[in-house]
């Protein structure tokens, strides 16, 4: 096959190839045309003849055998597709979430929420089905407020329907900030060709963990246990304001480690806000509980290692009157024994010390306690002697010791006392 170039030197305007015997076929190259049959190939001006595919916001430049497109000033793309930068996202809000690793330097997370820009870069309205799409966002966050200092840049890509139909977006960021720092966030959107300007900075003050509550006390009211406490000096922002607190919590357990499962009894009440008392219900009568209280803010709980624990003897008893009687069937704890008198001779110390562990809510310090001793002087004879004393102050576990003095005029013989 013979082939002949119409034009010497690049680019070739056309080619000629052998056809049937005695004939040949001529064809112009792309970008050229032969206006007359048998004429020469001439260069096409695609720009002038509106044969280009340049974007409306691009400039077409004719070249030998072809053309080129370049986006106009202020637009970005390949000339076939041109977009302006999207405008800044709207309504940017930052908030702090989840618990930190330490109360001072907060290895915590911050949530950011924003609305889509008004213009994605093509000027079309949100309800226009031909509107271009966004590919994602850039989020910048830093501590300390003011100008950007050691910022963290996070890319938030969009996928599927998010690119066109979702009106608002969110992301979560890990950031180490000191308590009280101003946390600043800026967001920019990006389309297929270019990222837009950042939004105005949204700010939030970094909160820390609340401190331990103070002066924990418990009192029985009816069948419930009311746990009172004083708010910590630092509830998260360096002051004792309850506005920083989400919840206040009281727990009671028969074990000092406060396990929620196993053989230990566990009770918990959570109140909204940071006030007290927190009321515990469902406790078992005649049971000693470890009781603690703590508060919770957006960041987390008071450090439990610093949370005071008190012992509370939960005992439900009718209100005592001057004539009320309490029967002590045996001493408490079991290691304390009654002293035995025989033939008028005391066998141990002069007092019978009884730890009345189950009456802290009924007896108070210096309450008068009266009782009787019964002495068996023969198989058929029993003598009764009255005694009186006062209740001692409660110890840390809530019990009171009643030291009962023996009567002076003891029978000359008794088998037991």
Image (tube, rainbow, N blue to C red):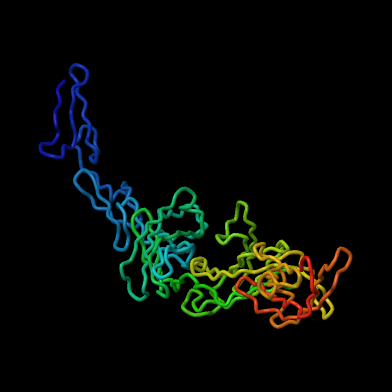
Q: Is residue 181 left or right of residue 223?
A: left
Q: Nearer the viewer, residue 80 or 76?
A: 76
Q: Position of residue 3 (x, y in %)?
A: 15, 26
Q: Residue at x 36, y 66 (%)?
A: 197
Q: Residue at x 22, y 35 (%)?
A: 28
Q: Position of residue 41 (x, y in %)?
A: 20, 38
Quadrant in which the N terminus appears: top left
Q: Splitting the image into 4 quarters, where does residue 292 fall? A: bottom right
Q: Is residue 158 left or right of residue 361?
A: left
Q: Nearer the viewer, residue 78 or 109?
A: 109
Q: Nearer the viewer, residue 179 or 370?
A: 370
Q: Splitting the image into 4 quarters, where does residue 265 fall? A: bottom right
- Furthest-left residue in view? 8
Q: Nearer the viewer, residue 1 or 140?
A: 140
Q: Residue at x 19, y 16 (%)?
A: 21
Quadrant in which the C terminus appears: bottom right
- Furthest-right residue in view? 380
Q: Is residue 323 above or below residue 173?
A: below
| Residue 275 visible at all | no
Q: Is residue 391 above or below residue 55?
A: below
């Amino acid at each position: 096959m013979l082939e002949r170039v119409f034009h010497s030197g690049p680019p070739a305007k056309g080619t000629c190839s052998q056809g049937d015997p005695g004939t040949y076929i001529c064809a112009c190259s792309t970008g050229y045309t032969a206006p007359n049959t048998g004429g020469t190939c001439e260069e096409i001006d695609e720009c002038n003849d509106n044969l280009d595919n340049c974007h409306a916001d691009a400039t077409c430049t004719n070249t030998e055998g072809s053309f080129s497109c370049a986006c106009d000033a202020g637009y970005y793309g390949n000339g076939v597709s041109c977009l302006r930068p999207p405008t800044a996202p709207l309504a940017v809000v930052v908030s702090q979430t989840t618990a930190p690793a330490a109360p001072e330097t907060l290895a915590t997370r911050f949530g950011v929420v924003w609305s889509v820009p008004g213009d994605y870069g093509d000027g079309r309205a949100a309800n226009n089905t031909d509107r271009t799409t966004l590919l994602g966002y850039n989020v910048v966050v830093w501590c300390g407020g003011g100008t950007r200092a050691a910022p963290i840049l996070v890319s938030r890509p969009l996928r599927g329907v998010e690119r066109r139909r979702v009106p608002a977006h969110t992301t979560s960021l890990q950031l180490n900030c000191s308590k009280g720092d101003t946390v600043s966030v800026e967001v920019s959107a990006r389309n297929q060709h270019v990222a837009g300007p950042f939004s105005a900075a949204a700010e939030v003050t970094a909160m820390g963990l609340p401190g331990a509550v103070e002066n924990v006390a418990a009192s029985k009211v009816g069948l419930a246990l009311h746990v009172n406490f004083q708010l910590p000096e630092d509830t998260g922002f360096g002051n004792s304001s309850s506005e920083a607190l989400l919840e206040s919590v009281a727990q009671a357990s028969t074990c000092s480690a406060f396990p929620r499962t196993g053989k230990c009894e566990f009770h918990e009440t959570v109140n909204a806000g940071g006030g007290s008392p927190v009321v515990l219900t469902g406790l078992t009568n005649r049971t000693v509980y470890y009781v603690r209280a703590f508060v919770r803010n957006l960041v987390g709980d008071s450090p439990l290692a610093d949370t005071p624990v008190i012992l509370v003897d939960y005992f439900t008893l009718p209100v005592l009157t001057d004539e009320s009687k309490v029967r002590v069937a045996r001493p408490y704890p079991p290691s304390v024994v009654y002293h035995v008198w025989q033939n008028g001779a005391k066998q141990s110390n002069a007092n019978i010390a009884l730890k009345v562990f189950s009456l802290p809510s009924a007896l108070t310090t210096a309450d008068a306690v009266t009782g009787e001793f019964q002495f068996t002087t023969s198989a058929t004879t029993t003598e009764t002697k009255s005694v009186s004393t006062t209740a001692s102050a409660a110890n840390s576990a809530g019990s009171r010791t009643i030291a009962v003095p023996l009567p002076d005029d003891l029978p000359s013989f008794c088998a037991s006392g």
